């Protein structure tokens, strides 16, 4: 019997959904479509298809968000593989396939799913996967082609050929993103499908074809897995070996050259959530075509998308617009130009601005912190510590800290003293003193931290002990 092993790819940055999606907290970790994050929705939609735990491929920076979001929905992954560097999808899936062959049943099928897609009709998606099993069991590398609903120029296409089995066809060609006229031709012909980037692959066949067609990728990934290490719940491939792998997608490295390719048509309300216009198109619109989320008031607006995180958005007389507000940045764009948001992100990187990577609320393995006030020689933060979690035992060279508990109970270590603080109680941590904050309670601990000193950067930390295995010096 073949076993379906979900492989969830979660290494992207989602720059076209800035300012909500950022490098430090990208779109797959955000609740953009439902109350759950895109990652959680992706993992949840395979429920009922398989009893195999997912293999999740991500990166080191997001490792604790990955683990926490899976824990929050009650999923214990078979592995959390941390890519030492980004090398695109062909090496990422190779790592997962090699891991699966070591730990899963022989003949397993890898259901490869990007973590940042949206699917409205989950039963239709699952039905397509079950159809794909039949052809994948014959040794075909199977992809899913979305039945197009419009002449979309933002997607690549697959030209489908003769039938192989019921519901599966030969891949005649992969086609790059077309211009509008060609996209209309593809739609009218009925022979073309959107390239979804989702696959059902026999692990052994994928690795055989990768070794034949892209041996440099195969060999680098093999050495990376063999030289890797297990760290807490994370599988860490060898960084030096993996860095020698070329960066390439499954399509370019394997699918465009293999003679074992197949495509299964998929009609399930799919979107790659690649830009704000995609979110506008898949979410519920009012009678004038507007999508409004958060605190929004509209007057005489049409076919526009509004998203408020912190403050009121008031829109008057706007057509075909996107307005997205966060605590520290606002995006205003014509709906047809939101693909160009990436150019804004590039400009922010060139200026070395923090808005490209971090929100005002920053997530850590123990909880989160949010900067409320930042001025010369002082900073005010709101800190939330999860139940049972604790920060590292640390000290600062350049700042002192005042802590005021506003919710829950804090266990405070300061030098050789350990004591408890309840709501409305406070303490002072002098500059240079070893200290630690922990939440021994069953509800989140919230406190206000007032920092004062000559330097307030997050890298002014020396760690003496850390539950999460982080470096002795670095960020909180």
Image: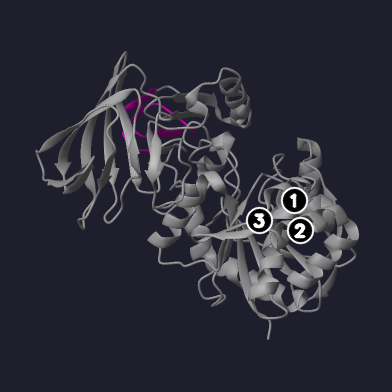
Question: Where 258 falls versus 105 (above or below)?
Answer: above
Q: What's the CA distance linking mark 3 and mark 1?
A: 8 Å
Discs 2, 1 touching: Cβ within 8 Å: yes
Q: In terms of secondary structure, where does tag 3 sit?
A: loop
For disc 1, the neighbor class at 10 Å (few under 14, some 14 to 19, many from 20) is some
Question: Image quarter for residue 68?
Answer: bottom left
Q: Magenta segment, which residues?
A: 293-315
Say whether residue 100 is left or right of residue 380.
Answer: right
User: Residue at the location (16% across, 49% down)?
Assistant: 409
Q: Which of 41 and 316 is in front in this view?
A: 41
Q: In terms of secondary structure, where does tag 2 sit?
A: helix
Q: Which of 46 and 265 is in front in this view?
A: 46
* Residue lying farthest to the front in this orientation: 416
Say whether residue 147 is left or right of residue 190.
Answer: left
Whichever of callouts 2 and 1 sits on the residue coming sooner in the sequence is 2
- The residue under label 2 is 223
> What is the basis of the colouring in this image?
one colour
User: Residue at the location (68% across, 48% down)?
Assistant: 239
- The residue under label 1 is 241
Whichever of callouts 2 and 3 sits on the residue coming sooner in the sequence is 2
* Residue 237's disc number: 3
Q: Which of 263 and 375 is in front in this view?
A: 375
Q: What's the CA distance linking mark 2 and mark 3?
A: 8 Å
Q: How far across and down, in percent of the image, does residue 18 sit? A: 52, 32
């Amino acid at each position: 019997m073949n076993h379906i092993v979900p492989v969830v790819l979660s290494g992207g940055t989602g720059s076209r959904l800035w300012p909500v999606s950022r490098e430090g907290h990208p779109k797959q970790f955000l609740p953009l479509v439902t109350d759950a994050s895109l990652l959680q929705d992706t993992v949840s939609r395979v429920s009922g298809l398989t009893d195999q735990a997912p293999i999740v491929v991500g990166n080191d920076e997001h490792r604790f968000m990955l683990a926490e979001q899976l824990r929050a929905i009650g999923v214990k992954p078979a592995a959390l593989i941390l890519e030492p560097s980004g090398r695109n999808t062909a090496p990422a899936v190779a790592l997962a396939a090699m891991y699966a062959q070591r730990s899963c049943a022989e003949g397993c099928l890898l259901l490869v799913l990007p973590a940042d897609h949206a699917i409205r009709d989950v039963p239709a998606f699952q039905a397509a996967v079950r159809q794909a099993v039949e052809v994948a069991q014959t040794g075909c590398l199977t992809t899913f082609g979305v039945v197009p609903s419009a002449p979309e120029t933002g997607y690549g296409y697959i030209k489908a050929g003769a039938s192989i089995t019921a519901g599966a066809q030969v891949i005649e060609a992969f086609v790059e993103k077309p211009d509008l006229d060609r996209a209309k031709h593809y739609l009218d012909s009925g022979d073309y499908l959107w390239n979804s980037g989702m696959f059902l692959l026999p692990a052994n066949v994928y690795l055989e074809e990768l070794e034949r067609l892209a041996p440099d990728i195969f060999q680098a990934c093999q050495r990376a897995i063999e030289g890797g290490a297990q760290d807490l719940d994370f599988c860490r491939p060898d960084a030096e070996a993996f860095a020698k792998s070329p960066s390439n997608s499954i399509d370019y490295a394997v699918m465009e050259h293999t003679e074992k390719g197949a495509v299964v048509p998929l009609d399930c309300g799919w979107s790659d959530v690649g830009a704000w216009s995609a979110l506008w198109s898949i979410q519920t619109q009012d009678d004038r075509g507007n999508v409004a989320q958060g605190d929004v008031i509209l007057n005489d607006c049409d076919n526009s998308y509004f998203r408020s995180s912190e403050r009121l958005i008031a829109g008057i007389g706007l057509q075909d617009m996107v307005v997205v507000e966060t605590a520290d940045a606002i995006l205003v764009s014509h709906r047809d130009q939101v693909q160009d948001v990436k150019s804004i992100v590039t400009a922010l990187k060139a200026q070395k601005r923090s808005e490209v990577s971090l929100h005002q609320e920053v997530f850590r393995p123990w909880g989160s912190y949010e900067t409320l006030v930042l001025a010369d020689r002082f900073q005010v933060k709101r800190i939330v510590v999860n139940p049972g979690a604790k920060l590292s035992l640390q000290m600062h060279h350049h700042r002192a800290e005042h802590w005021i508990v506003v919710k829950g109970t804090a266990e405070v270590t300061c030098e050789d003293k350990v004591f408890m603080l309840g709501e409305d109680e406070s303490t002072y941590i002098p500059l240079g003193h070893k200290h630690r904050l922990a939440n021994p309670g069953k509800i989140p601990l919230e406190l206000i931290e007032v920092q004062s000193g000559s330097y307030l950067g997050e890298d002014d930390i020396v760690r003496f002990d850390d539950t999460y295995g982080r470096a002795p010096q670095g960020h909180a």
